[in-house]
Amino acid sequence: MNHIDEHILELYVLHSPDIEERRGVIEEHFLECETCRQLAEEIAAQYSGAVQDLVKLEKQPVGTSTSLVPSSGKLVPFNDVFEVEARQKKTAIDRFVSFVRRRPAVAAASGLGIVAACVLGGMIMVNRIAKDDNPVSVLMNKNTYRIEVFNKDNNLLWELPYLRSGLRDDSVDIGTKAVAVADLDGDDRNEIVVSAVFPDCADASLSILRVFNADKSLRFQIPFQAKLRYGPFQYAEPFSTRYLLMPEKRQNSGQGVFLTCAGRRSPTGLMRIDKSGKVIGTYWHYGHLNSGYLTKLAGAGDNVVVLLGSNDAADTIVGNKTVHDPSIVVLNLEKIKDITESSATRGFGFQPSIAEMFYIKLPTSDMSIAQNQLPTPYLAYQSDSVLVITLQHTTMGVNVLPGFDFGFDQMMKPIWVKSVDGNDEIHRKLKKKGLIKSILNDQYLENLKRQIQYWDGTRWRNEWCRVQNPQ
């Protein structure tokens, strides 16, 4: 299938009169091509999320030795020019200390130096005791476009400006995050990990992962730019940071940072980065992995992530539409090492990953096919006994019926499939139009459950199985 030029999509988003006569053709193409539709959505999000009054940072070149793939392009370091000292009314002690600092000779000659030393020493001790400067929580303030960092008493410690997030929702309370707090090196001082795009990258062709120390100093940064080949396709494009996968507990020593990165096409990577900024490994997948959730599975320990998205490696044509397979990928994070690829989407030329535990393909209902929909999985609910994943089409961030809940146990075995509210009415209308012939009942749901497929490392199976990793 031919894709629409990105410039044309940008003109479409901006309602340019130059392509007004082609809007109908473009919109018909969107019904057949999820890739172009998602790209148009991302372009629209970038324009709507831009903040016109953000301060531009002075651009300086920085090395790319820690890049995912070395690039010859210029990168932009983070320059903290946004913090302005607050103007506060000075007390008598403040004025006294200021006098001593500015006139040390006069103060020493008059005997005030000893007093000043005592005052300064006392102030330092009081500040150390009274002010807790260890970050504990963060807030992405959408009103001010600033990342606000707080201590355990909820006192604001410092702020960082940001331009946009790779997430549709900037919340930091869900599995996928744009900013996270973690103690990477186990020194009881938390670091701030940021994947959101900063103002200094507003005009750049890539985004940068940045990790800040508790005192706001920059610990390290990693730019993302990759040249990949998948089969006959060449992907020489910027790969942007998407979302972080960080544990809720603050102690994260030794585990490091897990980050997804992707371009505007199918390839998506999950990177494992240690506390010093070294990339330990990257897992490449052909198809967007839109969300990820840290979880626990029976016999797998705590270092497990469930990634949800689509498998674009085996696109099929249903009617006049390209259908991508809604997929669930379960990985052991500790086994992400070196540069590898999913065994279910081979084609990058890397070795198959040994981190894959399960790879599951969910069925697309006749109701979704009849409406030319491409349903996407997302996590709806999780407990100690069940993992509920909802499969539903999304347009411009809004879920559209029909939708189905798939329940899995702790071994990722399917338990049940349930129909979400409103499906009955949609089914009735589609059947009245002659677009479907099925009956929406318990047997319909059981059939969906039976259509769930598992990848064993070499082929798809209709029964439960694990991925058999290469030894």
Image (cartoon, helix red, strand yellow):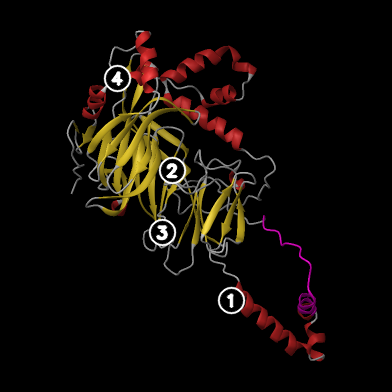
- Which region shows up in magenta? 82-99
Label 1: which residue?
129
Q: Which amino acid does label 2 sit on?
A: Cys
The residue under label 3 is 249
Q: State how far apart marks 2 and 3 are (Cα).
A: 23 Å
Could you say where residue 217 lies in the image, as x and y percent from the top left? 57, 62
Indicate which label's residue lies in the foreground, 1 or 4.
Answer: 4
Mark 1 Cα within 10 Å, few/some/many (few <14, many 20+)? few
Q: Which residue is drawn at 61% across and 73% down?
A: 130
Work out whether residue 11 or residue 409 is closer to the camera in this orientation and state it. Answer: 409
Q: Is residue 274 left or right of residue 414?
A: right
x then y, percent, for residue 123: 67, 78
The x and y percentages for residue 17 are 64, 17
Q: Which amino acid does label 3 sit on?
A: Lys
Crowd tier of the residue under label 3, counting other residues whose Cα lies within 10 Å: few below 14, some 14–19, many 20 or above: few
At a point 56% along the width and 64% down the height, the residue shown is: 153
Q: Where is 61 relative to 45, above or below? A: below
Q: Which of marks 1 and 3 is nearer the N terminus?
A: 1
- The amino acid type, in three-letter code, at marker 4 is Leu
Asked if residue 337 shows in the view, the reply is no
Q: Which of 59 and 410 is in front in this view?
A: 410
What's the CA distance linking mark 2 and mark 4?
39 Å
Q: Which amino acid does label 1 sit on?
A: Ile
Judged from the image, the secondary structure of the residue bearing numbered disc 4 is: loop
Give SS at disc 2: strand
At x 51% / y 61%, what residue is drawn? Answer: 136
Residue 145 falls left or right of residue 297: right
Q: Is residue 250 visible?
A: yes
The residue under label 2 is 261
